[in-house]
Amino acid sequence: MALILNIDTATNIGSVCLSKNGQVLQTLVNDQQQDHAATMTLFIQQLMQEHHITPAQLDAIAVSAGPGSYTGLRVGVATAKGLCYAWEKPLIAVSTLQQMTQGLLLQEKDTQALYVPMLDARRMEVYTAVYTAGLDEILAPQALILGPESYADQLADKQVYFFGNGSEKWAELLGQNVHATFLPYTINAAHMVQLSEKAFEKRTFEDVAYFSPFYLKPFHSTMKK
C-alpha cells in the first residue's frame, strides 16, 4: 500500500501518474517528445500541488526503464533519480514492455492468448517480448529484426495480440494470419501503476547511484566528429 509517483518518457509520449494503493489518482500526458525534459518536472509539481502532497508523503518513485527512445529514457531516469536523491525515496524500475502489456490487458484480456508489445526501433527492427495474460515471460525482451518467420512458434497454435508503435510494419510484413490480432494502444504512465505497486510491496528497489536505463542495445551517435 503506497503513494507512488510514476514517470514514463520511454517514447514520444511522456506522462506522469500519481497512484495510491495501486489506484490511479491522476495522470498528465505530453505527446511532444522534444519537451519531455521541461514538461515532466512541471507535471510532477502540478500533480503534487493539486493533490496537496508533499515529498515526505511519497513512498517511492517509479520510472519506465526501457527499452525505448535513448533520449526519452535518459530524461525519465535522470528525473526519477534526481527526485529520489533529493527526497530520499526508493527507486522502482518498470519494464516498458511489461508496462505496455499491462495497459493492453486493461482493455483486452484473453487468458489463452499471448501478448506481444512492439516498439519501433527504426527500419525493420523492433523492441519486443512475448507475455502471457498473467505477464509470464515467454520471450525475453530483445531487439528483433523482423522477418517472415518472426513469431512463428507463437502463431502456430495460439491467438497472439500485437500492439505498440512497432506493430504496423509487422502487420504489413505478416499479412493475413488467423492467429494474429493487431490492436491500437497508447502508452501511458497509468499502465505502470499495478507493476510499481507490486514492486513496492516486494521491496524491489534499484540502486539509485548505479541504475541506468534498459537500452537493449548500445547507443551509436550519428554526429560527425
Image (spheres, helix red, strand yellow):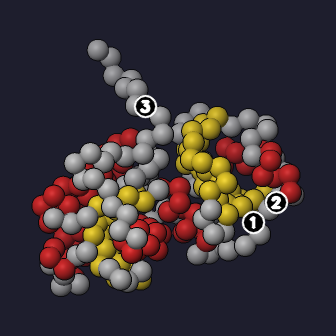
Quadrant in which the N terminus appears: bottom left
Res 210 quadrant in image = top left
Left or right for 160, reference 21: right
Residue 158 badge = 2
Q: Is residue 210 left or right of residue 182?
A: left
In the rendered structure, which disc, 1 or 3, sits on the residue that comes first in sequence? 1
- Observer-nearest of 127 and 56: 56
Q: Disc 1 marks which amino acid?
A: Ala
Q: Considering the numbered disc 2 on the image, is that residue within a helix, a strand or a loop?
A: loop
Q: Amino acid at mark 3?
A: Pro
- Dot 1 lies on which element? loop
Amino acid at pointer 2: Lys
The CA distance from mark 1 to mark 2 is: 6 Å
Residues at discs 1 and 2 in contact (Cβ within 8 Å) = yes
Residue for badge 1: 113
Q: Is residue 15 visible?
A: no
Residue 152 located left or right of residue 8: right
Residue identifier under label 3: 218
- Taking the spot 67% from the left edge, 63% from the top edge, the residue there is 132
Q: Quadrant of the C terminus?
A: top left
Residue at image point 43% right, 41% down: 215
Alpha-carbon neighbours of circle 2 within 10 Å: few (<14), some, or many (≥20)? some
The answer to which of marks 3 and 2 sits earlier in the sequence is 2
Tell me how far mark 1 sits from mark 3, CA to CA.
32 Å
